[in-house]
Amino acid sequence: MSLVLDPAAQDLLFREARTANTFTDEPVTDEQVQAIYDLVKFGPTAFNQSPLRVVLVRSAEGRERLVQHMAEGNRPKTATAPLVAILAADNEFHEELPALLPHFPQAKDMFFAERPVRESAAGLNAALQAAYFIIGVRAAGLAAGPMTGYDPAGIQKEFLDGDHTPLMVVNIGKPGEDAWFPRSPRLSFDEVVTTV
């Protein structure tokens, strides 16, 4: 059985998509970011939680503040990417549930009254949305460079607050010269999938 999605789109989103390590200086526009969000906001989350929050870092001052919290190997590419997004989980996402889940507004208090439960749900569902975001960046014809090599406490203090947990930092733009490392291997179907 073949996939319904056109092979060129499969390549764009998955097979040919790579984590970029260098970028051109071509800007990423607000319109592109809006189009990415308008596509990926429809990706499913449990209870339609939608806990992902995005901080776009465009200014030189913001970039300088961010780079100091990145791991040494991630600093040069973060300093030069046209746009950097800090993806975070909103641990108070439940406040939006009555609007996001109008047929079941009591879910807010029934399932998410306790902070540890919210943090767990927010982390899982925002990570799911972060994956959608990366695919949306690729769908816009841009390259994404997601990174988890950074000081989470530093980024939280500098850009977020105690109710938001950083998940990853994503460099975004058109790939530059020597943007790719060699493709790393992937596990086979049989190594991943078990049938019972």
Image (cartoon, rainbow, N blue to C red):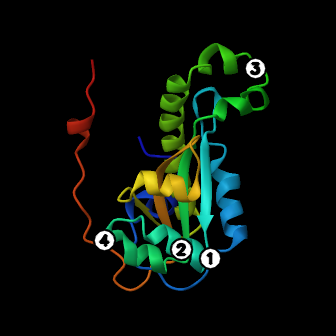
Q: Mark 2 and mark 1 in contact (Cβ < 8 Å)?
A: yes
Q: Mark 1 and mark 4 in contact (Cβ < 8 Å)?
A: no
Alpha-carbon span between mark 4 and mark 2: 16 Å
Q: Residue at x 71, y 69 (%)?
A: 30
Q: Which residue is mark 3?
A: 105
Q: Which residue is mark 2?
A: 63
Alpha-carbon span between mark 4 and mark 1: 21 Å
Alpha-carbon span between mark 1 and mark 3: 39 Å
Q: In the rendered structure, which amino acid carries the disc numbered 2?
A: Arg
When asked about the image quadrant of residue 60, the answer is: bottom right
Q: Mark 3 and mark 4 in contact (Cβ < 8 Å)?
A: no
When asked about the image quadrant of residue 14, the answer is: bottom left
Q: Position of residue 71 (x, y in %)?
A: 33, 65
Q: Residue at x 25, y 70 (%)?
A: 182
Q: Secondary structure at mark 1?
A: loop
Q: In the rendered structure, which amino acid carries the disc numbered 3?
A: Pro
Q: Dot 2, how many residues are within 10 Å of its Cα: few (below 14), some (14-19), or many (20+)?
A: some
Q: Which residue is mark 4?
A: 73
Alpha-carbon span between mark 1 and mark 2: 6 Å
Q: Secondary structure at mark 2?
A: helix
Reading the chain from its start, which is encountered first: label 1 or label 3? 1
Q: Secondary structure at mark 4?
A: helix
Q: Position of residue 20 (x, y in %)?
A: 40, 71
Left or right of residue 26: residue 34 = right
Q: In the rendered structure, which amino acid carries the disc numbered 1?
A: Ser
Q: What count of labels does the image hold?
A: 4
Name the mark nearer the viewer: 4 or 3: 4
Q: Which residue is mark 1?
A: 59
Q: In the rendered structure, which amino acid carries the disc numbered 4?
A: Gly
Q: Residue at x 51, y 60 (%)?
A: 9
Which corner quadrant holds the N terminus?
Answer: top left
Vertical order, 121 against 86 (above or below): above
